[in-house]
Image: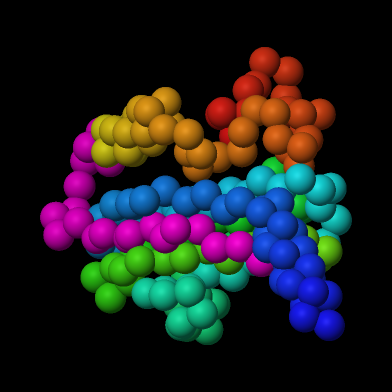
Amino acid sequence: AALDEDRSHILVHLVNLDLHVSQHREVRADDGDDAILRCYFTCQHNVTLGSFKWYKDRVGGREVSEKSFHNRLDRTGTQTFLNKKDASITIRRVSFQDAGVYFCEVDLAGVGKANGSGTELKINKEHAHKRGNKQHMEETQTQAWVEQAKSRQGAPGPPAQSPCFEPAALQPGQSAANI
């Protein structure tokens, strides 16, 4: 009987190794602007059914929901979640109270659950009034993400050749790194 328990315990761990969740480490936004918290996952199985949740401050803690964010939350739709492996959210009109660490949790039927390592949302004190400044900040953040992806393995974003990523979903001339 003890041997059977050990086998089932090992099986659970092997199944969870099939799912990996990636998040940005940090996102900055000006007070009053929208903040996109990106979350992507990879898996070794075809995904047909699943869901995702976000938590603030700790996994299993305060769930991020429309109610808790007073209708300021946009979630990735079901088709984008399943087809592009994208579990991102947008918090509209962020305020200083929104600052904190957010954790993405992906739950796939027949595979299990996995969490990202957390994204720290930082709210800038000074609002960038000029559109050019905002665009520069977005470009700088995107460039930092690209550099981070180049420098380490397992960077956020769907990999180009994941068994769960559907290359057919790409537009002509588009690479998986640009999704």
In this view, which residue lies farthest toward the top? 173
Q: Residue 110: horizontal and vertical position, in percent?
A: 83, 64
Residue 91 seen in the figure: no
In this view, which residue lies farthest toward the left? 126
Q: Is residue 28 magenta?
A: no
Q: Is residue 58 left or right of residue 38?
A: left
Front residue (pair 96, 111): 111
Q: Is residue 157 left or right of residue 103?
A: right
Q: Residue 69: horizontal and vertical position, in percent?
A: 45, 77
Residue pictured at 20% horizontal, 56% vertical:
124
Front residue (pair 24, 29): 24
Q: Is residue 122 magenta?
A: yes
Residue 100 seen in the figure: yes
Residue pictured at 32% horizontal, 38% vertical:
141
Tell me the quarter of the image containing the N terminus. Answer: bottom right
Q: Is residue 69 left or right of residue 52?
A: left
Residue pictured at 81% horizontal, 48% vertical:
45
The part of the chain drawn in magenta is 112-135
Q: Residue 148: horizontal and vertical position, in percent?
A: 37, 33
Residue 19, above or below 54: above
Residue pictured at 72% horizontal, 65% vertical:
10
Quarter of the image where one finds residue 66: bottom right
Q: Residue 73: horizontal and vertical position, in percent?
A: 51, 68
Residue 64, above or below 80: below
